[in-house]
């Protein structure tokens, strides 16, 4: 990517009318993605935006890049093939929580395991929107939906926990309305080599309105969100006086200045730590006792699938006497009549 | 070899079937015999018959592994019934005696016929010959195990290792019987066991001991088998799965595109994935996906990204892939789906052959979802039809289903090696940088093919997807009239492939009393049966289909010149149903069998004779 490319977010807008509901969190995410992509220094034709099925999966139609709106759950598998076949592309998958974690759950975990260098945005609104309001794998237990009129009886997935369980190397979390943070994370995900999973807490105004309201509430959000940045202390709160410490094997929220707690006691975020132990605890924090963790929670360098494949091909090619099909046809045991 | 041969049996062709426990090395024994025969100028065809279980219970009929070799002159099939059966234990005898020609020879390892083994094989008495009325055969009861032990007793090898060579004793006997040279097999030992000279020597000793045993006993009458009339050229043995893999690689080379195979292991297709995984020297990328759906969808992603993409599977896997095939249909991306058919439904008979999936290939998707369907008909022509399937997929921007089957996949044949210079260049309609006003669904008016704008090409950014697309522009469209237009275009696009496929050939007279119709892997058996009847001056011809959708342009003209038509298939009549729907003006008789086995030429001859005799 030597040539300097000057693009603006307008270059990424397609001529298609955006058909999401008014007030849907997807609008803000679309803007964030378009703005972030303009900053990445990648020529527009190198982007491939690939989606499955669901409200969020209409995303490719609204992006003036190469795009592929595929079938339910298969975005990650199709993107895996596209990136493996053509590693020069910047590949972005857009998934919802039903698409990515239910019908596409198998592809999601194996993508993480393989560590293919692509980016997957998981819009999590804890509901099936396009099919009009059924519970999803991330719906909180007890929630009443059209298929759980008396409340769900299923334990939900935490997407980040699934990433860790699948040996994922990168997990970040943002909120649709926080466009600045989303852009910052998207650029970081782009720069990370390997599979980057970005969960975006997204609001469905129709079927799960305010599902993340506890964290996004204007009055209290600073007390309920912890934005993590590598190398910085885990400090949050309206007065910037709350922080996280380790209490035995558990996290604990403390107030700086109370009970002898000082700045120095607060944990420093290490996104590059290979051990998922602390990342797991951060991913699982939830209110009211804890803030929700946002930002890049885990970002660990590791070998990348398609690079290893290319290297293997190059090494086998270099040592093989068979250079083309005619060589192959005449290799091994043959006889002449 | 100089032999004192008092009498010989002269034959045009011979079938020999090696059978034993699945741990007895019968596949190797059969392969060595067929390789030697091919190198000595015989025509050959082989077919392995093995259980689905890797180690089925020892000594039982379920655990019997077989390998049949047909060699000699004018060989089109692995043969129906064996002239010589090698049965290494009672279970092998129990399972295979019925596949031996009346008056044929059965070589048994006398030492394996213990009371315990007889019971395991399901014999009720200690005398299987009387019990199963095997006096009809020439039984050669040879002490194979003990002679092997005797041969190697000085080597210091343990008994278990020694007995592992007993298959080579049986092979040596067969080499005597058919006057085969030992050198090719000895060379094989030298290569295979390069690091353990003792094993090379032991195998050579046992092979030779078997040969000498054959020479010394009186029971064995040697055969003289005719050589084949073989065209000049360089040959190799190839099975259908390898030929398929190579055909795909050849097409990628001729299209100047990288080959990507997204696949998931499934019997009997997995060997294609094995072979392609090995061919990294030719730049092949294989992606062993997490499931069948991941196999095809990763391939569709690779196709979107500009590779020549394929996926390989068998019947149950094709079912799992059907939604994704529909995606490739509506996005009009090139894709080859290889389906190595096996007995169904469900898991069915994974290691057995059946023409199980023709209707699934044609119709097994939601919506009006046309794809091209092609079928290979011999192990070696899997190369040609894999190449053809690829060429059609790439030049017509469509998924193509290539049907082979377990019989073709594992069967081997000598194959005259082609020269890639004789194969055509493949021209995929790739949109060039600088194309003005690119529209993804703008079509070539002649063949209705859209052009392929590959991500990374500046200025051609566009979106495709599974929602119905507006004609030409490719934007999402719910307009009723447009859906009709696009549905018709997709069907017509596949129909126009007919311009690129050859006419249907008739083997025999263009006009006759009976036309036998077949497709795919039954070719060899149908050809043999029809040839046999033609030799008897019967009014019968054969039309064998490789192109199923679209059908060859002259199909109707061929069919209308025959008084009767019979469609013979290893299923309950799928191709017959299809022909009835395309050409309802003809009457189609059927001959069908679903036993997980190929036809026998004998049953076909009987059946065709009956049809010819009926007024």
Image: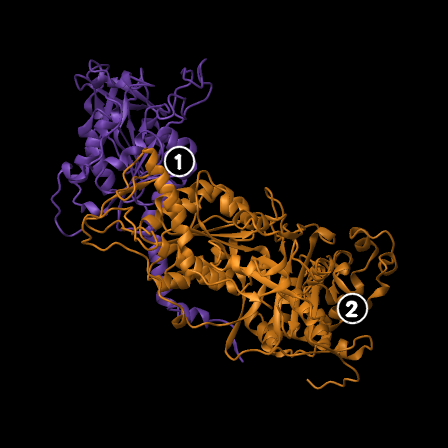
Left or right side of A40 for B585:
right
Q: Chain of mark 2?
A: B
Q: Secondary structure at mark 1?
A: loop
Residue B512 rendering spot, x and y as whole percentages: 63, 64
Q: Is residue B185 visible?
A: no
Horizontal placement of B134 versus A213: left or right?
A: right
The answer to whether the residue labelled 1 contacts the one labelled 2, judged by CB atoms less than 8 Å apart, is: no
Q: Colour of chain A?
A: purple
Residue at x 33%, y 40% (from the top left corner): B465
Q: Which residue is mark 2?
A: B104
The scheme the figure's colours follow is by chain
Figure quadrant of the C terminus of chain B: bottom right
Give SS at disc 2. strand
> Disc 1 versus disc 2: distance between alpha carbons?
59 Å
Image quadrant holding the N terminus of chain B, namely: bottom right
Q: Quadrant of residue A264?
A: top left
* B15 versus A66 height, above or below: below
| Front one among B195 and B120 | B120
The residue that label 1 is drawn on is A73
Q: Residue at x 41, y 61 (%)?
A: B249
Q: Which chain is rendered orange in the image?
A: B
* Residue B378 against residue B574 in the figure, above or below: below
Q: Position of residue B200 (x, y in %)?
A: 61, 73
User: Which class describes the residues within 10 Å of circle 1: few (<14), some (14-19), or many (20+)?
Assistant: many
């Amino acid at each position: 990517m030597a040539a300097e490319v000057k693009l603006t977010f307008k270059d990424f807008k397609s001529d298609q009318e955006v058909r999401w509901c008014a007030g849907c969190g997807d609008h803000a995410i679309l803007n964030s993605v378009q703005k972030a992509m303009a900053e990445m220094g990648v020529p527009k034709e190198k982007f491939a935006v690939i989606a499955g099925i669901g409200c969020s999966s209409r995303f490719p139609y609204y992006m003036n890049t190469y795009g592929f709106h595929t079938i339910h759950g298969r975005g990650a598998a199709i993107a895996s093939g596209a990136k493996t076949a053509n590693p020069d592309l910047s590949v972005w998958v857009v998934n919802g929580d039903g698409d990515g974690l239910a019908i596409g759950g198998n592809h999601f975990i194996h993508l993480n395991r393989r560590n293919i260098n692509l980016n997957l945005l998981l819009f999590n609104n804890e509901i099936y929107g396009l099919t009009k309001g059924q519970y999803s794998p991330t719906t909180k237990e007890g929630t009443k939906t059209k298929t759980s009129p008396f409340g769900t009886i299923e334990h939900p997935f935490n997407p980040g926990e699934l990433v860790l369980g699948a040996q994922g190397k990168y997990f970040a979390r943002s909120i649709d309305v926080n466009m600045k943070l989303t852009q910052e994370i998207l650029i970081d995900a782009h720069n990370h080599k390997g599979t980057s999973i970005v969960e975006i807490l997204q609001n469905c105004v129709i079927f799960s309105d305010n599902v993340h309201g506890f964290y996004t509430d204007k009055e209290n959000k600073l007390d309920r969100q912890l934005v993590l940045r590598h190398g910085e202390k885990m400090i949050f709160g309206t007065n910037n006086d709350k922080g996280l410490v380790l209490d035995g094997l558990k996290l604990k929220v403390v107030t700086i200045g109370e009970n002898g707690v000082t700045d120095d006691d607060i944990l420093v975020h290490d996104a590059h730590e290979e051990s998922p132990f602390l990342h797991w605890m951060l991913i699982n924090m939830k209110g009211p006792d804890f803030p929700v963790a946002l930002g890049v929670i885990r970002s660990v360098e590791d070998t990348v699938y398609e690079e290893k494949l290319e290297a293997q091909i190059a090494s086998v090619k270099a040592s093989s006497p068979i250079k083309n099909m005619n060589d192959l046809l005449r290799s091994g045991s043959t006889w002449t009549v | 070899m100089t032999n004192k041969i008092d009498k010989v049996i002269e034959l045009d062709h011979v079938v020999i079937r090696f059978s034993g426990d699945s741990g007895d090395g019968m596949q190797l024994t059969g392969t060595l015999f067929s390789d030697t025969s091919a190198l000595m100028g015989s025509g050959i065809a082989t077919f392995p018959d093995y259980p689905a279980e890797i180690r089925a219970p020892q000594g039982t009929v379920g655990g019997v592994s077989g390998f049949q070799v047909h060699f000699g002159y004018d060989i089109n099939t692995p043969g129906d019934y064996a002239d010589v059966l090698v049965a290494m234990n009672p279970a092998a005898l129990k399972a295979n005696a019925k596949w031996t020609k009346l008056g044929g020879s059965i070589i048994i390892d006398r030492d394996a016929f213990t009371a315990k083994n007889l019971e395991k094989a399901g014999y009720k008495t200690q005398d299987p010959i009387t019990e199963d009325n095997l006096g009809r055969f020439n039984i050669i009861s040879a002490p194979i195990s003990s002679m092997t032990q005797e041969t190697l007793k000085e080597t210091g090898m343990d008994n278990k290792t020694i007995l592992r060579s007993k298959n080579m004793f049986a092979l040596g006997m067969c080499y005597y019987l058919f006057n085969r040279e030992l050198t090719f097999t000895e060379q094989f030992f030298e290569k295979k066991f390069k690091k353990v000279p003792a094993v090379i020597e032991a195998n050579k000793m046992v092979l030779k001991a078997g040969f000498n045993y054959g020479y010394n006993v009186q029971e064995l009458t040697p055969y003289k088998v005719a050589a084949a009339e073989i065209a000049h050229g360089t040959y190799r043995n190839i099975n259908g799965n390898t030929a398929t893999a190579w055909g795909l690689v050849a097409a990628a080379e001729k299209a100047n595109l990288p080959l990507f195979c997204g696949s998931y292991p499934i019997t009997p297709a997995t060997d294609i994935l094995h072979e392609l995984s090995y061919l990294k020297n030719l730049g092949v990328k294989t992606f062993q996906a997490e499931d069948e759906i991941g196999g095809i969808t990763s391939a569709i992603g690779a196709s979107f990204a500009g590779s020549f993409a394929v996926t390989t599977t068998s019947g149950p896997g094709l079912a799992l892939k059907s939604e994704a095939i529909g995606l490739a249909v509506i996005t009009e991306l090139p894709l080859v789906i290889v389906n190595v058919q096996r007995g169904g439904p469900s898991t069915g008979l994974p290691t057995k052959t059946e023409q199980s999936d023709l209707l699934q290939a044609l119709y097994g998707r939601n919506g009006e979802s046309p794809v091209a369907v092609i079928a290979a008909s011999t192990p070696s022509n899997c190369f040609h039809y894999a190449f053809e399937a690829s060429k059609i997929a790439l030049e017509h921007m469509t998924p193509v289903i290539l049907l082979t089957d377990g019989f073709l996949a594992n069967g081997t044949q000598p194959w005259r090696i082609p020269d890639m210079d004789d194969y055509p260049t493949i021209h995929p309609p790739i949109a060039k940088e600088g194309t003005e006003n690119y529209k993804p669904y703008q079509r070539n008016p002649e063949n209705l093919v859209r052009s392929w704008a590959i991500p990374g090409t500046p200025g051609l950014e566009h979106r495709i997807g599974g929602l119905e697309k507006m004609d030409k522009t490719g934007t999402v469209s719910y307009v009723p009239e447009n859906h009709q237009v696009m549905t018709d275009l997709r069907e017509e696009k596949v129909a126009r492939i007919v311009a690129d496929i050859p006419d249907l050939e008739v083997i025999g007279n263009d006009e006759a009393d009976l036309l036998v119709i077949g497709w795919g892997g039954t070719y060899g058996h149908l050809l043999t049966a029809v040839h046999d009847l033609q030799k008897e001056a019967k009014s019968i011809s054969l039309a064998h289909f490789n192109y199923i959708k679209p059908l060859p342009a002259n199909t109707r003209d061929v069919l209308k010149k025959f008084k009767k038509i019979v469609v013979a298939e290893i299923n309950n009549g799928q191709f017959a149903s299809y022909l009835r729907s395309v050409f309802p003006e003809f009457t189609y008789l059927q001959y069908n069998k679903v036993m997980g086995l190929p036809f026998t030429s004998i049953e076909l001859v009987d059946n065709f004779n009956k049809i010819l005799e009926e007024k």
